[in-house]
Image (cartoon, rainbow, N blue to C red):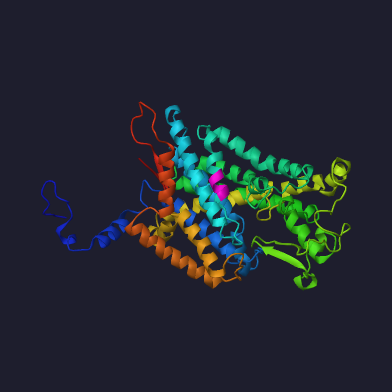
Amino acid sequence: MKTDAAPGATGIPRSDRRNPPALLRARAWWRDFGRAPRLMGIDVARALAVFGMMAAHFGAASELELLRPETWGALVHGRSSLLFAVLAGVSISLMTGRARAAAESLPRIRLQLLGRGGVIFAIGLLLELLNTPIAVVLTLYGILYIVAVPCVRWSTTRILIVAGAVALVAPVVLAGLYAVLLGPQGPGVTLVLFGTYPITVWFALMLAGLVIGRMRLTEVRTAALLLLIGIALAAVGYGAGSAATAALGGMGDEGSWSSSWSSSSIASASGNGGSAADLGVPSDDIDFSGMVCDDFRDGYITCYPEDGVIPGSDNEGSWDDADPEGGWESYLEQVRGFEPLAGMLDAVVSVQPHSGGSAEIVGSGGFAIAVIGLCLLAARPLRALLLPLAAVGSMPLTVYSLHVISYWVLVGPIGSMPASGELWAWSAIAFVVLATVWSMLIGKGPLEQVAASAARRAAEPRPSGDSGPTPVMTGSRVDT
């Protein structure tokens, strides 16, 4: 196209100079966004992870039955957040150049990870202060960046070995510790080890993401390979876990040791002493009088006595004197009460969302890898159709935070929102429009800008002799 641009002029075609700058930016975005070196498929996968977590918060079906399409929405429970964990590893891998980082660049890269992780953790804390029933993922997501610091120079073989060991062994060890330590409930261990998002699960899947990020993700055969590997891992994890659960008489159906507090609380509310076999009863048959219940929309409701009295228990009384003896004299008896062997076995076979079991890690990890492979395959032929989703995926931190804030605005502190697929759909549409317009006119999401700035500032001042700019991860690419 001819232009009348002289040397030093803008070079904008004459026909375009009459158009508003916003329109020109929109045209450029439509033409260029999502193309190499950006990995549009990764952005699309991030968007699916965010919308999946939103669906879980808006009350998607809690029990998945393959022969009942109306329950397929239950796929979002647990799997969406674990997809987020795998994608965290992919992002970290891209940030470090997709390969083992050079020794001279390691200090900057590690400081960037610390800075980014710290900001994400702080944003998560602010969202938790809103006191919604949402189990905010960002606090552990920030910790994940910090935990990744020593891993950035590991070889791919070492990463795979450690990921496999953590996935298969760590849940068993954690279940044993939970029993031996008599179910610790401190804020730190609850956040990192025994909460909704155990670090053992996220660390293993983050390592898997590191390996994926080192692959040639622009090639079709790589995407197809990821899809096949993911399907195979999902079949092995869910298949073996479900078969073992059935063979063991249903162990793991109600969640593993990580949700034992919720299960025992429900049992206490029904006044039946806590047998797992008694949990599968209609809610109308449970006496919730005098109970306070929390619904975290993860498939479980946690209930506890309003007045501190445990109804129907052998130690009826307050929580403070429920075990008046305590101490080392009754320690072994208390450990036996946690049934450590059964808990450790359950930690191997459980496939329930947020159970933290080995089978769940393999199955849900495979599901996440398959989704990433599918998104990479679809990104090129369906680019125009998927651009709005990619816009959401380019700013997942912002969109996720806005979702939590909007939830708080709608229901208030401690408020619980009734299940509403319609509300989820309208929210998703609103976020797609908002993210697309912002990406077109401004670019990087506002919270993504904050995280990137924190990463840069954490690496300053640069050591003497530094040459060249520090690579900074933006979305699904590396900028310098």
Name the dominant secondary structure of the magenta segment. helix
The x and y percentages for residue 257 are 74, 50
Whether residue 369 appears in this view of the structure is no
Q: Is residue 189 magenta?
A: no
**Above or below — where is 210 with respect to 275?**
above
For the point 39% across and 29% down, the residue is 463
- Left or right side of 136 for 257: right
Over which residues does the magenta segment extend?
139-143
The x and y percentages for residue 38 are 38, 48
Q: Quadrant of the N terminus?
A: bottom left
Whether residue 166 appears in this view of the structure is yes
The x and y percentages for residue 322 are 84, 54
Q: Quadrant of residue 286?
A: bottom right
Q: How many marks?
A: 0
For the point 88% across and 47% down, the residue is 325
- Left or right side of 67 for 94: left
